[in-house]
Amino acid sequence: MRSSNPVFSRRGFSRDNGHAGFNASPQAGAPVADANPYAQGTAPNPYATNPYAQQDTQYGAPQAPARSGVMTIDDVVTRTALTLGTVVLGAVLAWALLPVDEANLGKSYGIAIGAAIIAFVLSLVQSFKRKPVPALIISYAAFEGVFLGVISSAVSTYIGPGVVMQAVMGTMCVFAGVLLAYKMRWIRVTRRFYGFVMAAAMGFMLLMVVNLLFAAFGGGDGLGFRSGGLGILFGVIGIILGACFLALDFKQVEDGIAYGAPREESWLAAFGLTMTLVWIYLEMLRLLSILSGDD
């Protein structure tokens, strides 16, 4: 099974040379002796190769023997902090150096759009590479930060000075809430959960694209999915989808650690978590902007 996160969409868990990476999903029903190098000598279990199968009464992931050169939670936390820190630094610099007043609004918006396009291209390049490239990931984070900094500055200037901080706090609360729910096993990531989230995400993105096309060729706000009552509804849906992406990403990280993924894959985990948090922040910022505009 693959994660819903765009970074993980092409990477399940492979076991090349005895390591579990993110290149191909393990197949449910495959013999344990062939697919799980840590289960040799145990009775075959047709569900043991499914990362989302619960294998004990506590729903814990299978435990692998301690090995050197494999991904740990400390690796994921460190790389994620570095990647998110780069996003924040880029946003702060963009906020300070790219003003959104009347005289500089067009120029700042142009730079922000250019940075967003570059970040998108870098994310695609990384997504299609077999292994994570830290330089690409950090570059993506820097350009994404520039885009977020200009957009956040504009919202603070023209919507309300407190909206950005509210969006940041809201994003942190979503992250903490999903992490707690996942650790307490209130959220169980199963194939059904995965299929539901993917179907909802594809439908959501399709509607957003249609709305964008209507706005581009018909003017205004298109079908109204980005303002008013519909905008609030779709903002809430977008945040819920982001929370579901986080749960899938947490499961992907947990299974990568349990199956002994190479340490370099922690960069990929950090990349995916950063993209999901950016998604949640943008949806939170848009929702709060609509609510503030309705006051």
Image (cartoon, grey):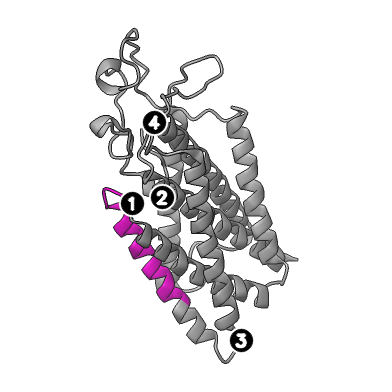
At 54% from the left edge and 14% from the top edge, which residue is drawn? 57
Q: Residues within 10 Å of mark 1 (few under 14, many from 20)?
A: some
Relative to the observer, which residue lies in front, 275 or 60?
60
Q: Earlier in the sequence, mark 3 or mark 1?
A: 3
Question: Residue 18's image quarter?
Answer: top left
Query: Residue 130: horizontal and vertical position, in percent?
Result: 26, 48
At 54% from the left edge and 85% from the top edge, which residue is drawn? 105
Q: Earlier in the sequence, mark 4 or mark 3?
A: 4
Task: Give the residue pinned by disc 2.
Answer: 267
Query: Is residue 10 shown in magenta?
Result: no
**Range of residues picked out in magenta:** 112-131
Name the residue at the bottom extreme.
103
Q: CA distance from mark 3 to mark 2?
A: 37 Å
Give the foreground label among 4 and 3: 4
Name which residue type carries label 1.
Pro
Secondary structure at numbered mark 1: loop
Secondary structure at numbered mark 4: loop
Task: Give the residue pinned by disc 3.
Answer: 101
Q: Is residue 103 left or right of residue 124?
A: right
Task: Give the residue pinned by disc 1.
Answer: 132
Are discs 3 and 1 less than 8 Å apart at CB? no
Q: CA distance from mark 4 to mark 3?
A: 55 Å
Secondary structure at numbered mark 3: loop
Name which residue type carries label 2.
Trp
Give the foreground label among 3 and 1: 1
